[in-house]
Amino acid sequence: MQTKLTLRLEDQLIEQAKVYAAQTGKSVSQLVAEYFKLLTSPRAGTDSPATPRAQSLRGLLRDSTCDEKDYKKYLEGKHH
């Protein structure tokens, strides 16, 4: 069952939320519902929830042959 919720927010924040919602193809209500779900999920409070973009990157380098030495070498070259 869905119930209506009224929020009082600054006009500018509401406009920014509408723009973001349009860019992501969602309604402001969907964004708020997703945020509330993140806040109340079992992981909430243990660490920061991953953003959808971060979640999409999980496992991306699973089969990579790069290791920590490669990364350190890259950083040394980048900063020298």
Image (cartoon, rainbow, N blue to C red):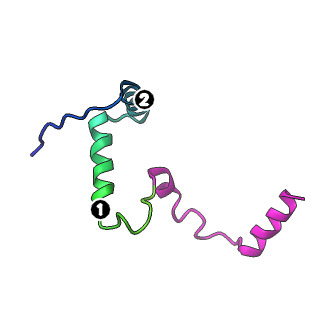
Picture residue at 33% right of the left edge, 48% below the top: 35
Rendering coords of residue 13 (x, y %): 39, 30
Precedes in sequence: disc 2 or disc 1: 2
Residue drawn at point x = 47 percent, y = 57 percent: 55
Above or below: residue 25 compared with residue 80:
above
Which x, y percent locates residue 67? 71, 74
Highlighted range, magenta: 51-80
Residue 43 picture location, percent across and down? 35, 67
Q: Quadrant of residue 28?
A: top left
Q: Residue flagged by tag 1: what amino acid is it? A: Ser
Q: Give whichever of 65, 79 is nearer the camera.
A: 79
Which residue is rendered at x = 58% and y = 70% of the image? 62
Q: Amino acid at mark 2?
A: Gln
Q: Residues within 10 Å of mark 1 (few under 14, many from 20)?
A: few
Say the numbered circle drawn on residue 16. Answer: 2
Asked if residue 4 lies left or right of residue 44, the reply is left
When asked about the image quadrant of residue 45, the answer is: bottom left
**What is the CA distance from the residue labelled 2 to the residue labelled 1?**
25 Å
- In the image, 26: left or right of 64? left
Q: Residue furthest right?
A: 80
Q: Secondary structure at mark 2?
A: helix
Above-or-below relation of 5 to 78: above
Q: Position of residue 69 (x, y in %)?
A: 77, 75
Q: Which residue is mark 1?
A: 41
Q: Is residue 30 above or below residue 74?
A: above
Q: Residues within 10 Å of mark 2 (few under 14, many from 20)?
A: few
Question: Is the residue under label 1 in contact with that under label 2 (CB below 8 Å)?
Answer: no
